[in-house]
Amino acid sequence: MAPRKGKKPIWVVEKERNKQAEQNVWLFGTHAVRDALLNPARERLRLVVTKNASDKLADAIATSGMTPEIQDPRRFNVPIDAQSVHQGVALEVRPLDWGNISENCAPRGEASCVVVLDRVTDPHNVGAILRSAEVFGARAVIATQRNSAPETGALAKTASGALERQPYLRVQNLVKTMLTLSEMGYRLIGLDGEADIILQDTLDVEPNAPTALILGAEGPGLRDLTKKTCDVLAKVPFQRDFGSLNVSNAAAVSLYALSQTRPALK
């Protein structure tokens, strides 16, 4: 019998369901899951907890309206890495949709700040950067759809809840996005260890201008085209011959330096 007109074949429905399941994210760890349970913008699907974790998260679980699945801690059966420190709690969610650059980054007369990441693929680094961005009041952290860390449980755990509050925008074309930020009035400052200019010196030039801090992957750093698109390249000064910072540390130091030039971000 032919399927009714307009009704999808079963194999198409299954394929779409499997594709959606592949896009879902398993968050784990007390802080990451608690904040996801309290985030009204987060679409939550399945909550798996031990009895002990359920008791610790009782208020957040009640607020979310979810019914948790209680499991034995010795047989915690969820699809996360066996080495993950899950603390007896895991939550299946759909990725957050933060909207577009214009919605999140338009300065609106403020001395705004955004962080732009060029090929930063380590989820722990991105998670730490999200945490620093939230602390120092950045409007968004921006990365590419490809060659960057996607939203994962490891990223969320390192962000310690910041993933639920700090916009993490994934874009198709980084240079095009940088040009859009420039049109919005942002000053594009690329962090480069071999630059001639000290970061604080260039921040002092236009202390109240909307600022985009552009950071590259450890090792290769910023790509050539990314560098060319920046308004200025600057470096974090160092006191010894070995002057290299982890990218998440460089982001934190740069955000702190920027905060010292503008009272609104202190």
Image (cartoon, helix red, strand yellow):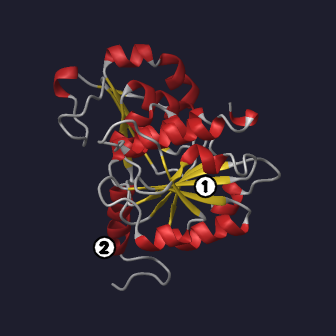
Quadrant containing the C terminus in the rendered view: top right
Can you tell which quarter of the image residue 144 is in? bottom left
**For the residue marked with disc 1, what is the amino acid?**
Ala
> First in sequence: mark 1 or mark 2?
2
Q: Viewer-nearest of labels 1 and 2?
A: 1
> Against 57, is 134 above or below?
below
Quadrant containing the N terminus in the rendered view: bottom left
Residue drawn at x 39%, y 19% as measured from the top left: 54
Of 6 and 71, the residue lying toward us: 71
Q: Mark 1–mark 2 contact, CB under 8 Å? A: no
**For the residue marked with disc 2, what is the amino acid?**
Trp
Residue 232 point in image, percent of width and height: 57, 61
Q: Is residue 45 visible?
A: no
In the image: residue 1, left or right of residue 167: left
> Against 23, is 264 above or below?
above
In the image: residue 231, left or right of residue 108: left
Can you tell which quarter of the image residue 65 is in? top right
Residue 243 point in image, percent of width and height: 34, 43
Residue 38 point in image, percent of width and height: 56, 31
Of 45 and 163, the residue lying toward us: 163
Residue drawn at x 59%, y 49% as measured from the top left: 140
Which residue corresponds to mark 2? 11
Which residue corresponds to mark 1? 212
The local crowd at label 2, few if under 14, some if 14 to 19, many if 20 or more residues have their Cα within 10 Å, is few
In the image: residue 114, left or right of residue 207: left
Residue 118 point in image, percent of width and height: 43, 60
Q: Is residue 159 visible?
A: yes
In the image: residue 243, left or right of residue 45: left
Residue drawn at x 37%, y 59% as measured from the top left: 221
For label 2, the SS is helix
Residue drawn at x 41%, y 42% as measured from the top left: 248
Marks 1/2: CA distance? 46 Å
